[in-house]
Image (cartoon, rainbow, N blue to C red):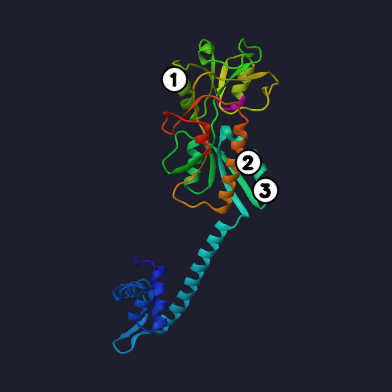
Amino acid sequence: MRPNVTVRQLEYLVAIAETGGMTAAAKLCHVSQSAVSLAMAELERALDVRLFIRGSRRGAVLTDAGRQVTADARKVITAMSELGASARSLGQDLSGRLDIGCYAPIAPFHVPAAIATFGTVRPEVDVQFVEGTLPEIQNYLLDGRCELAFLYQQDLVADIDTVVLHDRQPSVLLPGHHRLARRRSVALAELNDEPFVLLDVPPSEHYFQTVFDAAGLEMRPAYRASSFELARALVARGLGYSMAVQQPAVDQSLEGLEVVTRPLSGTVPTTPVVMGWAAGGRLTRRAEAFLAHCRTTFAMTEQSQPTARATSVAPGGRAARGTRSRILGR
């Protein structure tokens, strides 16, 4: 199998054509003469053609084939230069498409608000989104399908960089007729003997287990719901209580039955919502603008939430104590 032709070899070829010799070409390219000589030998072997007539007096004289290949090489080098300039301009241009991802259970609470409000200030950016599980969305970031994504700061791989958007204490969901529905806050221990409805979308079970562990209680799900609205509907029908981090503005299930949301009392582990992206790369200006907008937008939303004592659950599942102001970088 013949070796591949490289752009560096073509650059050396053009340099030889312009200077008339390998030694001069080496100086022009800031490499050794032996490096140029080796590269030209490999290029001739790859193309299976003689490019030079080598002589001590005449230097390196291009053959007819060498002149043709040199002309083509100049076109390739120019095209590569234009490609790089075009790619850089795409990254720096605010107009264009921005692909984002979102962990499916929190998508209704973040994606519509982010796209709508960002569109008012940056209408030239076309924001498109995809939903998925936490592992799926992280894979989308790593393979380039998405540039940014809304995630929970839990079970994240090492190649994902994040910034916290908000960190809220979980609440308990109760049917409207529940004996604790009129309380300002509820202790998890007060519900220990009642059926628990688990939102069973990874990593929700892992997180809610930390909440039960912090309270010194055993988590015994009576029902497992694969969607937030199904969990609320089961609660509204009086089939149990549930917990949620995100809090809808409506207090009814899809059937129109009352669902009461009450803060959990005491110090409760939290799982911050973060914006993530693939580590090691540089964000486009569109992504940088969207990230800055979301940090401001959801920080303002966070300020409107009631203050609560909380410990944030770190990516490895351990709880780390911290304050909201530090988490949000204020």
According to the picture, the residue beneath numbered tag 2 turns out to be 114
- Give coordinates of residue 27: x percent, y percent: 35, 77
Where residue 62 sits, quadrant-wise, is bottom left
Element assignment for label 1: helix
Q: Depth check: 150 or 50 in front?
A: 150
Kindly identify which residue carries mark 1.
213
Report the residue at 65% width, 19% height from top.
259
The amino acid type found where label 3 is placed reads Val
Q: Residue furthest right?
A: 256
- What's the amino acid at mark 1? Asp
Q: Position of 34 compared to 165: left or right? A: left
Tell us which disc is closer to us: 2 or 3: 3
Task: Tell me which segment is drawn in magenta.
Answer: 225-229
Disc number for residue 276? none
Between the C-alphas of marks 2 and 1, the distance is 34 Å
Tag 2, which secondary structure? helix
First in residue order: circle 2 vs circle 3: 2
Q: Name the residue under label 3.
A: 121
